[in-house]
Image (cartoon, rainbow, N blue to C red):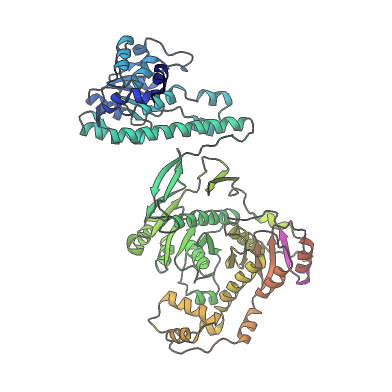
Amino acid sequence: PASLSDRERTAFSSPSDRNTTALKMATDLVQVKRALISVSDKTNLLVLAEALKNANVQVLSTGGTAKALKEAGLPVTDVSDYTGFPEMMDGRVKTLHPKVHGGLLALRGNADHEKACTDHGIDKIDMLVVNLYPFQATVAKGADFDTCIENIDIGGPAMIRGAAKNHPFVTVLTNVDQYAKVIEELNTNKGSTTLKTRRTLAAAAYSHCAAYDSAVSTWFSAQNNEEPAVTTRAYELAFPLKYGCNPHQLPANIYSLHGATLPFKVLNGKPGYINLLDALNSWALVKEVRAALGIAAAASFKHVSPAGAAIAVPLTEVEKKAYEAPDNLSQSALAYLRARNADPMCSFGDWAALSDVVDEQTAMYLKTEVADGIIAPGYTPEAMAILAAKKSGNFIILEADPSYKSPAGEMDFREIGGCVFAQRGHGDKLITPEMMNNITTKNKDLPESAKRDQVLSSIAIKYTQSNSVGYAINGMMIGVGAGQQSRVDCVKLAGRKVTTWWMRQHPKVLGLQFKSDVKRQARVNARVRYIEGDMTDIERKTWAEQFEVVPEPLSPADYEEHMKKLEGVTISSDAFFPFRDSIDVCTKYGVKYVVQPGGSVQDGGVTDACDEYNLVQSHHGMRLFHH
């Protein structure tokens, strides 16, 4: 502006204004003539150094990196020889020198910068290769305070930030995974790198420093048992997704925590957003059931809640017929067949989870069912071949890491609508059989089979959208009521599913005579609609075309007489029962055993209701809301 004085004009002119000419001189290709390498992770160091040698690049280096290069017979100049200052203070001061930072920050073509370099003997550095002291790994090993402090890198981040700022002229590498691309580019461009690559590497460099500083800050706060005032979460792109929950929700990606892997590997197919939510929840469920009960477990998930879950308990002859079960099932195959047959209509197009290695029998059974994908700790070669061919090769197969622990520790973070929610996760707060021993009713006869069902049902609803309740018998969920605002509505919803499950074993249902061309899932759906019985005239006409002999409808007496035969069922609730109405309702579905956290002011009245029905109730003391 005209009103500015000469002094104000000078101040108003920013460094970027004064350096515009120099920056414009930055070309797409910049030849690398001198590189500084100082790395703690020496993976593929010699491969990179050999490529630089072939490109006639002079290499500066420090400490252990310089030693490794010299031992390999590669030419290298010690930074201390270049700067004229030795490494000092136990290595704390090595690269903090104007000849290093001037070489990284000097703008090519800027007359002032060029003169400063000439006057002070500063050589321009065109490439920086640095990965930082392994601070996170040192902390993870349980090192003491002083050792952790000495693993906080100072010179490395300073050089990285300087090189990244000057990316029009300097190539900065901070990860071993970047070496191959840069080597290829040097070979292709006669020792030069492109501006696009330098910008990409600069962005990665700043992310690397941010993640590093965040880890240090979080650790420091923890030493005083304080929450950090600012929490930085650093993520690395793992792979893009086709879309989010819905096709219009783009872009959509999966990230891993910086410096860590995902808790699974994608062996086949392309998982979607909801697939992965199902995979992570279902894997947590079966892993916990396996740990608690010591038996192969499986789950059938849809929209982040289980349609069914079960352990490998032998089938009755009636169940074999009702489920159309093949002979000679392995433990894993048996567990999944039972999980899927809790609610086979809802399990159509499910996500499967297995606690044990998937074998050929399990894969053969899955081959016959409509499912989106599977997660398990491993697969036999035969099983892998069968599953990889499913859905024209698009069946999603994930291999879970049973030993995975989040590098972020116990805290879970979720970003919604501009707010960041943080809470301690409860995946390590396991449901165990011992928790069922707190029996609050007069009837304290809790057989081991019922205790097992209490554990299974409680773990299942731990990973079900709240409010939720679940019914179980003989190591199998037979009705899950999820996501209702009223707990008694959960009881009714899940109870309706129990009725359908049990009525599938009614002689009239077992005796339905289907035409030979009616497919498996169509038979499943037809049986369910026969049991529900609320078909319109038009629907009934289409439904009847599937049978050789059209069956007569089930009568009220059929339901009443058959439901009276169901007994020994367990019901579990993710939170306390606030009123006795849930107890009154659940007894219509064969419930003998109740398990819940307890803790309501109405606990006494609910327990009295259990006593009136001579039920056995346990309070395990852990609320299990899941959202």
Screen quadrant of the N terminus: top left
Is residue 612 covered in magenta? yes
Task: Specify the principal SS of the magenta part.
Answer: loop
Q: Locate residue 394, reporting x and y percent.
A: 35, 60
Can residue 611 be seen in the rendering of this structure? Answer: yes
Residue 42 as seen in the image, left or right of residue 341? left
Residue placed most toward the observer, 446 or 57: 57
The residue closer to the viewer here, 451 or 462, is 462
Left or right: where 194 falls relative to 621: left
Q: Is residue 314 above or below residue 531?
A: above
Residue in the foreground of this view, choosing between 489 and 152: 489
Residue 379 shows in this picture: no
Residue 357 drawn at (x, y percent): 46, 55
For residue 185, above or below residue 623? above
Reply above or below: 575 against 99.
Answer: below
Q: Quadrant of residue 313?
A: bottom right
Which quarter of the figure is the C terminus placed in?
bottom right
**Percent coordinates x, y for residue 311 in the rendering:** 55, 62
Left or right of 153 in this view: 564: right
Which residue is at 41% across, 57% downward? 248
Q: Which residues are magenta?
A: 611-627
In the image, residue 98 above or below residue 339: above
Residue 226 relative to residue 202: left or right: right
**Residue 327 spot, x, y in % from top left:** 46, 71
Q: Nearer the viewer, residue 84 or 354?
A: 84
Q: Which residue is drawn at the image coordinates 43% and 77% (left, top)?
A: 522
Q: How many marks?
A: 0
The magenta stretch spans residue 41: no
